[in-house]
Image (cartoon, rainbow, N blue to C red):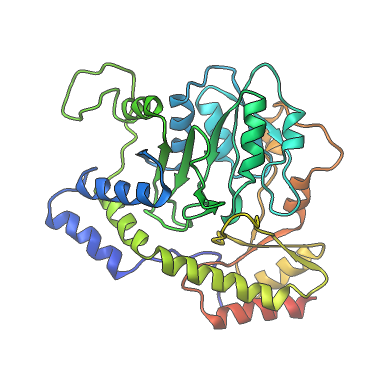
Amino acid sequence: MKVPQFMPFVGPDEYLQIKDCFDQNWITEGPKSKKFMDELLDLIGAKYGVFAPNGTLAIYLALVASGIQPGDEVVVPDFTFFASASAVIMAGGTPVFCDVNPDNFQIDLESAEKILSKRTKFIMPVHIYGTCCDMDSLIDFAQRNSLQIIEDAAQAIGVRFKNQHAGTFGSVGTFSFFADKTITTGEGGMVVTNCPTIYESLRYLRNQGRIDRGSFIHPQIGYNFRITDIQAAIGLQQLSKLEEIKSKKKAIWDYYYKELSEIDSISFFKPNSAANFIPFRVGILSELKPVIDKALNAAGVETRSFFYPMRKQPCFDGLRHDIRDKYISDYAYDHGICLPTFVSMTEEQLHYVCTTIKNSL
């Protein structure tokens, strides 16, 4: 049996939404994009939002609109996807890396404290694997150290900390709608803010330095960061399925946890108890990772490792990071396995994955 790591949850309903774009003869950013934005802002609870072509460029826009200057440092967790750090460099800043906590790999503020300098202006909590950082502690930390909060909520659509949506705690929050995200538009991103000044800057930055698309007068420097109504059409249909997606992802997590959590050599990623949980990945850790990986791959089950630590990326060589003997992010990469977690996954596939793991130990 072949079990892929991920499959997008799209079908005829999304196709009909796309067809409507052609029937209406509107494929650029237009009425469907506006409707998609309105529904997203209603879900997230932010005052303002703009789209971006992807999550990486959403972070770039967030940083530039927030006033990042060349050489400004941004605290980034060592355990995250590459784009969290590369977008900082793209925006002219410098990422500096701190460790994460051992339970759910969210940012470790004790580690972050050790890398602050006079150049540190921002901190980027990354809401990893479908749960939230401890935003109470992070807000307090940011205020004490005069840091702006730029939230990377790429994996956290629908996720809330104490009933407040991820991405709305800082001055700016960003989301991704890539194919493997909770809802997808294929490619796409979003920036949200409650600050009218930042929102105004975002509008100029993403639309060639102007507010109105039909104008050839450009008051500011800006670029083309728009999306299409074809993408928004897919997103609207996906958003209508959000409750179904949440329910099925949680059921997949529950199945894995029931079958594997009692095995001594396996531990699970632990969501933040103050947040709801929409599993982005089902992450397990084991000292026997090589054995499990080999068995799953041989059985046709596609696995994925946890993130490779940012401070070890060859392209980030020389950037500052917390100096400590042991990094949790190292342990996570060395022992972490992402099990297949896609909405259309069948019970037969789940049983096959779990049985393969059990038989390998």
Q: Residue at x 23, y 65 (%)?
A: 16
From the viewer's perspective, tell me whether residue 278 is left or right of residue 57: right
Q: Residue at x 36, y 46 (%)?
A: 41
Would residue 251 be seen by someone viewing this image from the given angle? yes
From the viewer's perspective, tell me whether residue 260 is left or right of residue 186: right
Position of residue 103 measured from the top left corner of the image (x, y, whole percent): 73, 54
Viewer-nearest residue: 306 or 202 = 202
So how many labels did they put on this image? 0
Position of residue 100 measured from the top left corner of the image (x, y, whole percent): 72, 44
Direction right: furthest residue: 325
Would residue 315 be seen by someone viewing this image from the given angle? no
Direction left: furthest residue: 24
Position of residue 81 measured from the top left corner of the image (x, y, whole percent): 59, 45
Q: Is residue 320 above or below residue 156?
A: above
Q: Residue at x 79, y 43 (%)?
A: 327
Position of residue 302 measured from the top left corner of the image (x, y, whole percent): 60, 66
Image quadrant occupied by the N terminus:
bottom right
Q: Is residue 278 above or below residue 161?
A: below
Image quadrant occupied by the C terminus:
bottom right
The answer to which image quadrant residue 289 occupies is: bottom right
Viewer-nearest residue: 302 or 70 = 70
From the viewer's perspective, tell me whether residue 243 is left or right of residue 135: left
From the viewer's perspective, tell me whether residue 141 is left or right of residue 287: left
The answer to which image quadrant residue 284 occupies is: bottom right
